[in-house]
Image (cartoon, rainbow, N blue to C red):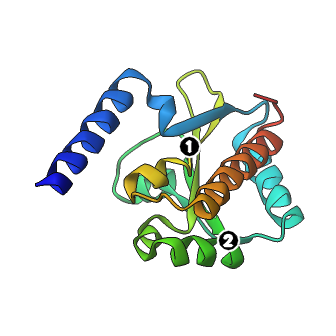
């Protein structure tokens, strides 16, 4: 019963936070560049940090194959085994959300934006309480912010 109340409280808090401020779980950086330049700069930021880029999925191209149209939209899956493994040692279930992702998309005004999930959200999603693991998530948040800012060319 005690666990059900705790779980219900966490879900309620997540719901309220998510409704009031979407930025609590995701962060978006505006790029000063076009899509291809932003992706190129993203790849450079990844290389500089010795991270692995697993793939970039082109949602626009996939939509076109289905005879549908969306603005340019791509998602990159990337990570660093050392960090991902350490996080999964904290809580194996977090592997569902790994590797990390960044969404590159163009809004209706033609502005390219970069959106990613705040890694610290994973501490709530997976009930991570270990201080070392929380510090790892905090460092991941800072790294993702730095990568997105470098890719987009705008400090946020």
**3D distance between C-alphas at marks 1 and 2:** 30 Å
Q: Residues within 10 Å of mark 1 (few under 14, many from 20)?
A: some
> Which is nearer the eye, 123 or 76?
123
> Which is nearer the eye, 69 or 78?
78
Where residue 57 sits in the image (x, y, percent)? 54, 62
> Which is nearer the eye, 81 or 153?
81
Residue furthest front in the image = 2
Residue at image location 56% in from the left, 55% down from the top:
75
Q: What's the mark number on residue 72?
A: 1
Q: Residues within 10 Å of mark 2 (few under 14, many from 20)?
A: some
* Quarter of the image where the N terminus is located: bottom left
Q: What's the mark number on residue 83?
A: 2
Quarter holding residue 10: top left
Residue at image location 70% in from the left, 43% down from the top:
35
First in sequence: mark 1 or mark 2?
1
Is label 2 in a helix, a strand or a loop?
A: helix
Q: In the figure, is residue 97 to the left or right of 135?
A: left
Where residue 92 sits in the image (x, y, percent)? 44, 76
* Quarter of the image where the C terminus is located: top right
How many marks do you count on the picture?
2
Mark 1 or 2: in front is 2
> Which is nearer the eye, 45 or 56?
45
Q: Is residue 118 above or below residue 51?
A: above
Q: In the figure, is residue 131 to the left or right of 10?
A: right
Q: In the figure, is residue 20 to the left or right of 71?
A: left
Q: What's the mark number on residue 106?
A: none
Where residue 26 sits in the image (x, y, percent)? 52, 39
Is label 1 in a helix, a strand or a loop?
A: loop
Where residue 131 sits in the image (x, y, percent)? 60, 58
Residue at image location 44% in from the left, 24% down from the top:
21
Q: Is residue 68 above or below residue 87?
A: above
């Amino acid at each position: 019963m005690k666990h059900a109340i705790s779980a219900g409280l966490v879900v309620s808090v997540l719901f309220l936070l998510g409704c009031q401020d979407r930025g609590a779980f995701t962060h978006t950086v505006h790029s000063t560049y076009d899509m291809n330049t932003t992706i190129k700069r993203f790849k450079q930021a990844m290389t500089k940090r010795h991270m692995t880029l697993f793939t970039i999925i082109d949602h626009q191209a996939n939509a076109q194959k289905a005879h549908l149209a969306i603005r340019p939209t791509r998602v990159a899956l990337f990570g660093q085994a050392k960090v991902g493994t350490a996080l999964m040692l904290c809580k194996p279930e977090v592997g569902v959300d790994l590797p990390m992702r960044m969404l590159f998309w163009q809004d209706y005004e033609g502005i390219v934006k970069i959106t990613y999930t705040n890694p610290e959200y994973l501490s709530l999603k997976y009930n991570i309480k270990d201080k070392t693991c929380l510090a790892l998530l905090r460092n991941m948040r800072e790294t993702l912010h730095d990568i997105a800012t470098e890719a987009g060319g705008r400090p946020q």
